[in-house]
Amino acid sequence: MNQHNSNNAPLKELIDRFLKSYRLDGKMKELDVLNGWEEMMGVAVANRTEKLFIKNKVLHIKLNSSVMREELANGKQIIILRVNQFAGFEIINDIWFE
């Protein structure tokens, strides 16, 4: 017999509950998104990204290429969609370029 109670819940379930109870689940997902930047955007963009963070549902991006900054700014809605799909929910609703 395999009963699930709080004493023998799978580790992942316990960790998820812990993160949610301390409201850390969103921060962990932010880290997943930031760590997945190269996978989402490609090596060329990742190599030119100097700073990347999420604050108040806004993705802040600092690039060392003005040409790339302009190109990404033109594709802002696509990036928002891609990031949110990667996260599995709306983690951002805007992007600011520095």
Image: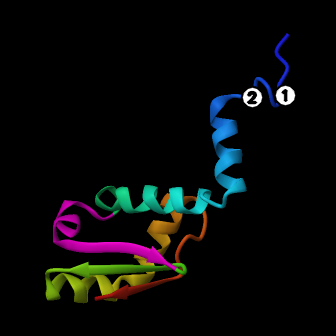
Q: Is residue 89 above or below residue 21?
A: below
Looking at the rendered structure, the kind of residue marked 2 is: Ala
- Say whether residue 27 is visible: yes
Q: Is residue 34 above or below residue 15?
A: below
> Is 66 placed left or right of 35 in the picture?
left
Residue 13 belongs to magenta span = no
> Is 34 placed left or right of 20 in the picture?
left
Crowding around mark 1 (Cα neighbors within 10 Å: few <14, some 14 to 19, many 20+) is: few
Crowding around mark 2 (Cα neighbors within 10 Å: few <14, some 14 to 19, many 20+) is: few
Please identify the quarter of the rendering in which residue 51 is found: bottom left
- Could you tell me how many numbered marks the image carries? 2
Q: Position of residue 68 (x, y in %)?
A: 19, 81
Please identify the quarter of the rendering in which residue 91 is found: bottom right
User: What mark, if any, has residue 14 been given in the picture?
Assistant: none
Element type where label 1 sits in the image: loop
User: What mark, if any, has residue 5 been given in the picture?
Assistant: 1
Magenta part of the protein: which range?
Answer: 41-55
The answer to the question of whether label 2 and label 1 lie on touching residues, with beta carbons closer than 8 A, is yes
Which quarter shows the C terminus?
bottom left
Which residue is nearer to you in this view: 81 or 62? 62
Give the distance between the C-alpha atoms of the residues marked 2 and 1, in whole angstroms: 6 Å
Q: Position of residue 28 (x, y in %)?
A: 52, 56
On the image, numbered disc 2 is attached to which residue?
A: 9
Q: Tell me what residue is drawn at x 72 percent, y 55 percent.
A: 21
> Is 1 placed left or right of 8 in the picture?
right
Please identify the quarter of the rendering in which residue 13 is found: top right
Q: Tell me what residue is drawn at x 85 percent, y 20 percent.
A: 3
The colour mode here is rainbow
